[in-house]
Image (cartoon, helix red, strand yellow):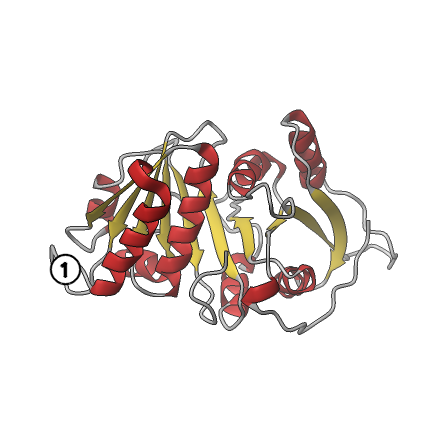
């Protein structure tokens, strides 16, 4: 159905729950929703899936037509016995409307995919970068799923630092690991590249262990490089903070490893960690 989103609605961590999942490419829906489902605790609202329809050449109407991606999302949810909120909406500015929809729904997370066309370009026309930019001053975390499949996940790797990105990475990784009852290995990204990381990182790891027990393990990333990051995370799912991903040159298009799933996260700077 169609929608009109209220602009600049103030958000705060206290009343934000759930995920907004914008979809555009039907072929990328399955892995994106698999992660969204895994990151949604049973006591939170189900993921809200939105497909934005550009107006170009179409007469204005209150009702936006469902897209192939939205149809694929509904079918995937039905096939897996999962409830989602689904809507289509007109847009002239996809990034701004994604942010407006997230604020209107008061979600804690936006989870979207990085889509490429056959020529290798970003078919969302830079929407991912714009969402990162527009969400930065808000109390909303952003996760960008840049590749992968919806095959079961046996272990989660998370590269965490002591900043807002690292806290959000750890929160998302714990959500997924606890829901899937799988192991989580945190790679502590120390500023001083020491075997003894900063106290805030150590405390984050201790709190995670206290909550997860034997399912949680931590290690120190021994070198700030993409090669070492991938070497120390030999699993299917790797979650990395955007700032660190930029530092090591993690590409927002394709990561070596074939079936490896990678999520790049930007944490909300206005809160320690939106749950």
State the image quarter where residue 174 is shown. top left
Residue at x 82% of width, y 49% of height: 1
Residue at x 68% of width, y 37% of height: 83
Residue at x 51% of width, y 38% of height: 38
Asked if residue 177 is positioned above or below residue 269 in the image, the reply reads: above
Label total for image = 1
- x and y percentages locating residue 191 in the rendered image: 20, 64
Q: Which residue is mark 1?
A: 193
Q: Is residue 15 left or right of residue 160?
A: right
Pick the front one: 261 or 115: 261
Which residue, as the protein is rendered here, is positioned at the far left? 195
- x and y percentages locating residue 110 in the rendered image: 56, 55
Q: Is residue 206 left or right of residue 141?
A: left
Asked if residue 157 is positioned above or below residue 244 in the image, the reply reads: above
- x and y percentages locating residue 240 in the rendered image: 35, 51
Say few, some or many: other residues with alpha carbon within 10 Å of mark 1 (under 14 / 14 to 19 / 20 or more).
some
Disc 1 on helix, strand or loop? loop
Specify whether residue 255 is in view: no
Pick the front one: 172 or 263: 172
């Amino acid at each position: 159905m169609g929608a009109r989103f209220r602009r600049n609605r103030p958000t705060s961590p206290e009343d934000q729950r759930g995920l907004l999942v914008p979809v555009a490419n039907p072929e990328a829906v399955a892995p994106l929703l698999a992660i969204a489902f895994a990151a949604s605790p049973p006591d939170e609202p189900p993921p809200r899936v939105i497909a934005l329809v550009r107006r170009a050449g179409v007469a204005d109407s209150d009702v936006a037509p469902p897209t192939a991606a939205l149809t694929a999302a509904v079918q995937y949810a039905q096939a897996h016995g999962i409830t989602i909120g689904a809507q289509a909406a007109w847009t002239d500015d996809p990034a701004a409307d994604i942010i407006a929809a997230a604020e209107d729904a008061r979600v804690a997370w936006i989870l979207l995919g990085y889509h490429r066309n056959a020529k290798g370009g970003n078919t969302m026309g830079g929407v991912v970068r714009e969402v990162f930019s527009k969400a930065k001053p808000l109390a909303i975390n952003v996760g960008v799923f840049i590749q992968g499949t919806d095959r079961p996940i046996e272990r989660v790797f998370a590269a965490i630092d002591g900043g807002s990105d690292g806290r959000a990475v750890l929160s998302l990784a714990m959500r997924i690991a606890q829901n899937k009852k799988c192991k989580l290995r945190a790679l502590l990204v120390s500023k001083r590249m020491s075997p003894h990381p900063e106290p805030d990182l150590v405390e984050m790891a201790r709190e995670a262990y206290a909550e997860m027990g034997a399912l949680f393990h931590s290690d120190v990333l021994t070198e700030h490089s993409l090669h070492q990051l991938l070497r120390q995370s030999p699993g299917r799912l790797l979650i990395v903070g955007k700032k660190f991903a930029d530092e090591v040159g993690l590409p927002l298009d394709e990561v070596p490893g074939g079936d490896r799933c990678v999520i790049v996260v930007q944490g909300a700077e206005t809160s320690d960690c939106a749950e």
